[in-house]
Image: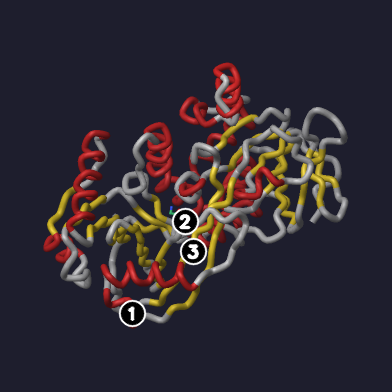
Amino acid sequence: MSCTGPRPGREVAVLGGGLIGLAVAWRAASRGLRVCLADPDPGSGASSAAAGMLAPVTEAHYGEERLLALNLRSAAAYPEFVRELENFTNMPAGFDTRGTLAVAFDRDDQAVLAETARFHARLGLDSDRLTGREARRLEPLLAPGVQAGLLVRGDHQIDNRMLHAALLAAAEKAGVCLHRARAGLLTDGTERVRGLLLESGERLPAEHVVLAAGCWSSEIEGLPPGVLPRIRPVRGQILRLAMPAVPVLTRTLRALVRGRSVYLVPRAHGELVVGATSDELGFDTGVTAGGVYELLREAHDVLPGISELPLVEARTGLRPGSPDNAPLLGHTALPGLIAATGHYRNGVLLTPVTADAVADLLTEGALPEYAAPFSPDRFAAADRLAASTGEF
Ligand code: GLY
């Protein structure tokens, strides 16, 4: 498909057809902008590997309160986002509100879970402490040794593969011109971005380029040095099992097992996702025997019934990690280039809020207040501070 020809009005080119890129493209096109998008294989990266947990509470970490506020906002936006998407495409997005149960396997894990409960209470987050017996009442196939639980009703999940398929359909229906091709930035030797340059040599001129290329964002052809901090790939190995008609689990389970974390995400259509490792090994996408062994060992310790389930998939995804593990949203130092990347562990969760914030920036010229702290220039400011204090 070609995006060339006379095009009145503003133009946007999106680089990356994962959940973030597609949602931005859909939202921008819905607001009347003319949008094209380039990706050689949309959704083949982290968007399809992910487990789809929408878990601002059970993934809240110490020192990340600012990110927590963004995560909570996006979680709150999900029901309406999904409703609009499903109505527009007539496709299900696999949104599931059955909640999340966190459990502790041994006494040490129980102490950590108790501290997590206190952390939630301090932040005013909604979670309820359970005894092991109460947890088993909710999920009868939990191992008898499970010591304690924490029920977080507001942490939901979505089938990220169904969501991606629906967003792809929505973007195309809204008029986004999709190029299944590798692309770099087009600058024409100037100090601003002028669009995208496809590997075929085809040019996609655009006033703004939205960079949504996940862990490849800082590797993009044509990106001048220093415009973005390094976005590092963080490998997650993840498994998919098939559940019987009577499921072994009815809600997302996050377990601490002898200090190690594992999650199990049951889909309504019978899939059980088990994840995930966190390996900083560059762009290596291999699945390892050790990674699979550890995931299955921990999962089996808390839910022994999984040993009978068919293992249908073992794969990896590369999370895009920014230097502070929070996303980069907004204008970069290269005029015309807008970042929508670096979502690390929260890409699925942050899809609605990212799309809306970037669409606001494109149509109104400014990021909404809630997104402003995630501007890429926070790293330039940190660098300046480090330079002035002699810290590197
Ligand atoms: N958010 C889940 C993960 O990154 O593994």
| Residue type for callout 1 | Ser
- The residue furthest front is 390
**Residue 141 percent coordinates (x, y):** 22, 72
Q: Is residue 115 left or right of residue 299?
A: left
What residue is at 23 percent from the left and 55 percent from the top?
Answer: 109
Q: Give the residue pinned by disc 1.
A: 307
Rendered position, 205 above or below 266: above
Q: Give the residue pinned by disc 2.
A: 278
Mark 1 and mark 3 residues within 8 Å of each other at the beta carbon: no
Instruction: State the mark number for residue 237.
Output: 3
Residue 211: image quadrant is top right
Q: Secondary structure at mark 3?
A: strand
Could you tell me how far apart the alpha carbons at marks 1 and 3 are, in whole angstroms?
A: 18 Å
Closest to the camera, between mark 2 and mark 1, is 2
First in sequence: mark 3 or mark 2?
3
Rendered position, 236 above or below 62: below
Could you tell me how far apart the alpha carbons at marks 3 and 2 are, in whole angstroms?
A: 7 Å
What residue is at 21 percent from the left and 70 percent from the top?
Answer: 143
Rendered position, 211 above or below 16: above
Rendered position, 297 above or below 281: below
| Residue type for callout 2 | Ser
Respond yes or no on whether mark 2 lies under 8 Å from ligand 1. Answer: yes
Q: Secondary structure at mark 1?
A: helix
Ligand 1 shows up in the quarter that is bottom left
Residue 9: image quadrant is top right
First in sequence: mark 1 or mark 3?
3
Q: Is residue 327 left or right of residue 9?
A: left
